[in-house]
Amino acid sequence: MEKNGNNRKLRVCVATCNRADYSKLAPIMFGIKMEPEFFELDVVVLGSHLIDDYGNTYRMIEQDDFDINTRLHTIVRGEDEAAMVESVGLALVKLPDVLNRLKPDIMIVHGDRFDALALATSAALMNIRILHIEGGEVSGTIDDSIRHAITKLAHYHVCCTRSAEQHLISMCEDHDRILLAGCPSYDKLLSAKNKDYMSIIRMWLGDDVKSKDYIVALQHPVTTDIKHSIKMFELTLDALISFNKRTLVLFPNIDAGSKEMVRVMRKKGIEHHPNFRAVKHVPFDQFIQLVAHAGCMIGNSSCGVREVGAFGTPVINLGTRQIGRETGENVLHVRDADTQDKILQALHLQFGKQYPCSKIYGDGNAVPRILKFLKSIDLQEPLQKKFCFPPVKENISQDIDHILETLSALAVDLGGTNLRVAIVSMKGEIVKKYTQFNPKTYEERINLILQMCVEAAAEAVKLNCRILGVGIGGGIIHQHELIHGSSFCAAEFGHLVVSLDGPDCSCGSHGCIEAYASGMALQREAKKLHDEDLLLVEGMSVLKDEAVSAVHLIQAAKLGNAKAQSILRTAGTALGLGVVNILHTINPSLVILSGVLASHYIHIVKDVIRQQALSSVQDVDVVVSDLVDPALLGAASMVLDYTTRRIC
């Protein structure tokens, strides 16, 4: 096993409630089944899967050769608000026995349905880890509330879009337990190549129907405004009758209001109308081909704004049910679908168009990412969730120590001449600073840094400063946030290699920027010149016991020492080449040089950019920081930014 805290297989329970969530869960189930050395799969089927009026869709799970471990009849018929509540209650009564028997390590739950809420509630209360698929999305109606409630119950999250990931982080979910994978259904959508799609079209719509010359309609009730959604469905059917194209109409889901929508269909004679084919269920593989080759899809199903974008099929999204969803350019929204004419006009605008395929919701590689994520789950980690609350400004606390203490960081500056350690407060104030001469050997430097940090930490206790961490390094700022990297080592610019046969670097490599341009590097070159009696010029002197440093090299260069000037030019050129590499890699809008050497390098760096950089990045601003002790403040910010964003 890669990492699940023990040496046994991970027991995964996948619970599916309806045809829609099975289309997302099936690719994951196939992936789990293909790796029996890592996983044991239990399948629990409940909800509308087991109802004849909704197509008995559990059969497609059996046809996919999955063993259904448990069937739970959890739907209380009535298709109204009370029936939805009673269905949740019935599922909550039945699920504990199933979970006690299966004892899964983790339960996979999908989406925003009331059945899924019952699953997540049961698993959370029984201390079973929950992996939630499609958290962080916005879907409208009561589904939004249910989706976000499941998010708070779930321990791990698989999201489909970058926006959904950011929503989860904004909801204080632990970033380390969020996987941006894409939608699992896209793994099948983007690889769907059925040359015999015409036989599928004829089977469902008739022998005389051509590709791109029919409509797929799928409309569900809006549970927060059932009366209006029924009226809107009636207008949709009237518009489709007037539009006079062959149309495949799928029955609505089991939400409150669906019974009334079916009555509207029968009242208008849709099941017997020559232009319509009304069906309870279409297998997903066939449904893919039907929407991929349709002239248009209409309704308010999430499938229209999500999956159909993979084919560029034009979509008319009616009403408010999918407000807030990310969509491709193939979707035309009719927010206020309050007249037949408005819907008819939308049909005329969209029917028969072909849009670019959209990959907003996935790139076809979601399942491998999800399986890797499952394998990484450590079952020995505490089950209790940790919420990553943002810092609260002017927080009022009853704890006097908390009120008085100052959140701080230890900042370390590894200078050429001196080592410096400082206690830096959240406001960017240096509370106390410690300075020592830099020893000659690596071991001595490390020991001295540790000693200085221990002394500073002890002093911080006396100063009532709470140390959140120790910072060393440069930084990349993106959208007002520091980039930390997977192991907090991002932006080690000093160790960019600019020459394969350059001088030795303290990191063990050769030709790093630091080996040319750091204070220690200049000190080394200054000492070489001094040993050869080539450093001092008129107006300079070095006392007998005085150590030669980078300051002497700079002074010599200013007084006309050609060799000192050449060394500074080489150092500045090395730094400039490193900056050019950064410009070509991340294309920043601003480069800030800091430290005592920055003003000596800036003109050389700008010259190198003009000579070596691509024209597209040559206009970047390069400036010298005017902060006092910028190295210490920058190092502290690495700690303070990260810790205050992710812990309370």
Image (cartoon, grey):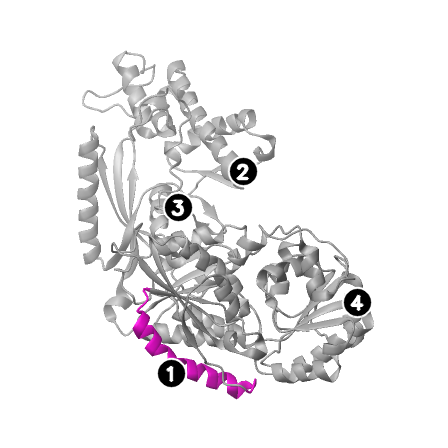
Q: Where is residue 617 in the image (x, y as percent from the top left)?
A: 57, 35
Point out the frontmost of discs 2 and 1.
1
**Secondary structure that dominates the magenta span:** helix
Classify residue 14 as left or right of residue 527.
Answer: right
The structure residue drawn at horizontal position 46% and vertical position 73%, both measured from the top left corner, is 116
- Residue ID for mark 1: 93
Point out the frontmost of discs 1 and 3.
1
Classify residue 307 as left or right of residue 597.
Answer: right
Nearest the camera: 56 or 563?
A: 56
Say whether disc 3 or disc 4 marks the residue closer to the N-terminus: 4
Q: Quadrant of the C terminus?
A: bottom left
Q: Is residue 308 magenta?
A: no
- Residue ID for mark 4: 245
Q: Quadrant of residue 52?
A: bottom right
- Residue ID for mark 3: 485
Q: Residues within 10 Å of mark 1 (few under 14, many from 20)?
A: few
Q: In this view, does 386 lie above or below 600?
A: below
Say whether disc 1 or disc 4 marks the residue closer to the N-terminus: 1
